[in-house]
Image (spheres, rainbow, N blue to C red):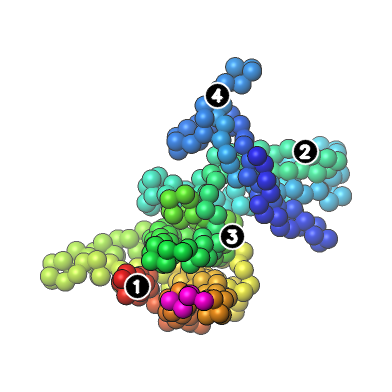
Amino acid sequence: MERRVHTAGGGANGDPLRTVDYALVTLTGFAALMALTNGVGTPCVLPDGRPAVQMLSAVKTVTATLPPIEQQLVQYGSTDLELLPTLKQMAQELGAYTRTTQRATDVHGADVARRSFLQMYGWELACTGPDTYALRSFWEWQSNGSLLKYLVRCLDQSNFPLGRACFVAALQEALQLLHVLSRAGIVLGDLKLENMLVDEHGHVKLSDVDGAGLLDASLLYATQAVAQQAAVQAAAACLDPCAAAAAVWSAADRLFAEEAPYMVTDAYMPLEMSAYGVMCAASHQHLLGASLGQLLGALQPLLLAAPGREVCWALVTELRVLATGMQTPAHTDRPDLPCVWAQLEGIRARWAV
């Protein structure tokens, strides 16, 4: 049942080894309660009488060996394990996940947060060898894998109208996730197609939020108040209140997060990050456009050379123009989310027949 689906790190430079496995796990305590709350898993009772839940899960494991100085601290009982720099580094993603999902819950409510972010059910720290520790966390499994692989499969369908409809619908879901992030003042430095996962129904969720930065809470709530006021004033003047509020949020999306994201894929890095080490919600348009553009650029020659796939090539070419437009060097020049949505909706409508 268990199989390895991803491996990273663990090189000669001493980086922790990171793996992801698909496995049947038995959860107890709060983790079991979390699984039941989300309607997943099968309740069972362990031999010692404890209630538990069995479920297929994505098991993320971070493994690292303590450097000599930390080994000595542990040996002489000079510090608690959780205070060691190596273990704190191993737990970075869990900390980022907690902060990010809490912010999303505070702003949007628990239901939206659950629909937008991959759910984690629990974690455990185990000593696996001399001075070696493994931090395992248990996450919901998304059967369609990454959004990148899902989009490729959409275009590979023999039923092209269905495939292109699923392709565009998945991109629209990705834009909705960017909307959730924007309104919550969350900036994901490593946002890309590979870090969005797709379930059996084609629903897209955010994964791997390690390196997230947050807009200052007071600034976020001030933006909410100004947007609401703008909507009220627009309605009183018989103007579009939604457009008035969206304009306020579009301006706020250009404000840099107080916490700079500490993780980003170099190939997709926007100028504001490479030049100044900062990012904002508008950085998401660049990140999504860059990762999507790279995929589409790789698909174009393959589709052009494949007999009967010319129509696929035409759709991919049009989408690549959209992706390129999302990658303006200056973050202030990038199209806002309503603009990108309108362009994608236009593509969907043109390809609906």
Residue 265, picture quadrant: bottom right
Q: Which amino acid does label 3 sit on?
A: Gly
Residue 87: % across, % down: 72, 47
Residue 36: % across, % down: 47, 32
Residue 260, picture quadrant: bottom right
Q: What residue type is labelled 1?
A: Trp
Q: How crowded is mark 4: few (under 14 residues within 10 Å), some or many (20 or more)?
A: some
Label 4 close to label 2 by CB (< 8 Å): no
- Up the image or down, 290 lies above or below 209; here it is below
Label 1 close to label 4 by CB (< 8 Å): no
- Up the image or down, 310 lies above or below 24; here it is below
First in sequence, mark 3 or 4: give its number: 4
Depth check: give the residue in front, 17 or 40. Answer: 40
Residue that badge 3 annotates:
211
Q: Please, what secondary structure does the residue beneath circle 3 have?
A: loop
Q: How crowded is mark 2: few (under 14 residues within 10 Å), some or many (20 or more)?
A: few
Residue that badge 2 annotates:
127
- Up the image or down, 306 lies above or below 192; here it is below
| Residue positioned 51% across, 82% down in the render | 329
Residue 270 visible (yes or no): no
Q: Which of marks 1 and 4 is in front?
A: 1
Residue that badge 4 annotates:
44
Q: Which of marks 4 and 2 is in front?
A: 4
Q: What residue type is labelled 4?
A: Cys
